[in-house]
Image (spheres, helix red, strand yellow):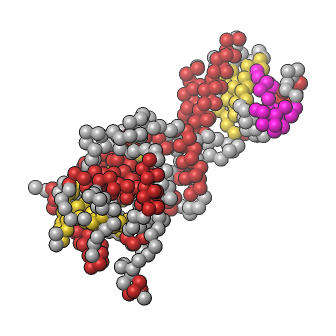
Amino acid sequence: MSSLINPSLSHTPPSTRGYNPAVGVLSNGLLTTTDVQHAFIAATAPSIALAPGKRNSMALRKTPEISLSALIYIFNELIINYNFNQSSNIAVLEKKLNALGYPIGIKALELHSTRSASPAAPETKRFTRVLDVLQYIHTHIWTMLFSKTADNLEKSQDNADEYMIIDNEPPLTKYAKPPKEFDQLNCNAFVAGILEGLLDAAYFSCSVSAHTVPVDGFPMRTVYLIKFSRSVLEREFVRFSR
Amino acid sequence: MTIYSLYILNKAGGLIYQTDPCPGLNKLSANEYLVLAGTLHGVHAIASRISPTAPTPNTGFFGTGKAVAGNCNTSGLKSLETDAFAMYVFQTVTGLKFVLVTAPGTRAQADAAELVLCRIYECYADYVMKNPYYSLDMPIRCDMFDEKVVEVTQVVV
Amino acid sequence: MSYYLAMIGTQDNPIYELEFGSFRQGNDGTSKFNPEMKELNPFILHAALDIIEDVQWETNTLYLKAIDNFYGHLISAYVTPGNVKFLLLHETKNEEAIRHFFTDINDLYVKVLLSPFYNANDPIISPSFDVKVKTLAKKYL
């Protein structure tokens, strides 16, 4: 009876099943003998540290690279063709590609900043200013994703809330241009989704879209248009205008 | 080396790509191109059968034990030389054929032609196979592939 | 000495909680919060979120140190670049140990995040994560 009236004080058998959000701290609160044994196993099992300067650090090794061909085959078949068949028009397809990129952005931000810590400065930085985070994407995130920096970062002349990151030769669409009937389609909407997820996670809420703006020699030159929401600009103004 | 014409045939003998990089040649009708491609495919198949060094049937394809398609060997028809033109054929492991028609030339030209065919094969692998809007064995309509083929054939001329 | 750790997602939703005690001076790691305090812990930490929201834009470090207190209990905070907050309710000031604790939890969190079966802001129910956090607690606190 007391367990019903006062659930957080009642005694529940200790479990090693991890945190249960429906139960709260009682699900994983007690350190039992089994827990300690598990902890011992966990502590002695080899694990790879993400941050540099630690034992088995992944970051100390050479930057991992994968074959562009393999990436493009996967991107084409799994991502474009699969969604292509299920989309009624280009806008829907781009939206789906964007949604697929979104969670990748969140994960990429956390992973990159953990990896970029150095033994001298074990703690990385957060971003508080719009320009800082855009510079970071232009340089570091692009290098992580595509092994090169983006070609340009511009501020829109017409709208204060719009910024543009420009890639002359986006790797994912290096080999293919959409046919004429899908002229408006740019499959880098996937990359735009990555940027959107990343910026949203860092509390720079925005929407990102990819547009093809060809110039001579670069038929798939892509402009990522980043439109920040008003709250971001207001915060920027209130915090940093002085 | 003057390249008159380039044909790409799919594994069933259908013409999927045709271009004449050399200006000023008389064009055939679309149907005639298809007939030409089909004939070439047939001749290639026969040539591979009558070749004294042809692999015996059913020895397997790359050791997989799968039966080899009739014309899916590495020899077959490789080149054809006449007083008016020379023709070089390159067949990939999947049965795709690249056919280059050039002005008649010397022995050295055959090597050059082989190189051109390899470069075109490379372009095909990059700009056709990695194009998500292209479906296999269908006629090739890829702007970037067109550009690259022009580039490759221009360099040779 | 008792501690209450909570990880808060970007929508102010809890994704992980742990209540534990000190392992120092012969303690076995069980928490010694009194019953009233146990009930209050989540509320105290959630109240601290408002302060984080202000403080996190004033500095660009991840570790925000002790940002709030509640009748002698201190609340230390750590915000990852993706705005997941780690909050620790503790009784004595111990900045360096808590910094190391948070930094290592961040590493663990990123590993959880890399799992294709984990979406950002989901509760972390992985038992191995749970055990590893406890190991860290034992190591640093």
* Residue C25 in picture, x, y percent from top left: 26, 58
Tell me the residue at 46%/73% (across/down): A13
Q: Residue C38, relative to residue A233: is it above or below? A: below
Q: Is residue A155 visible?
A: no
Q: Residue C69, relative to residue B81: is it above or below? A: below
Residue nearest the observer in this picture, A53 or B124: A53
Tell me the residue at 55%/38% (across/down): A69
* Residue A14 in picture, x, y percent from top left: 44, 69
Q: Residue B141, relative to residue C116: is it above or below? A: above
Residue nearest the observer in this picture, A14 or B134: A14
Q: Where, quadrant-wise, is the N terminus of chain A in this rendering?
A: bottom left
Q: Where, quadrant-wise, is the C terminus of chain A in this rendering?
A: bottom left
Is residue A92 rendered to the left or right of residue C105? right
Magenta-tinted stretch: B57-79
Tell me the residue at 30%/75% (across/down): C38
Name the outermost residue toward the left: A242
Is residue B54 rendered to the left or right of residue B86? right
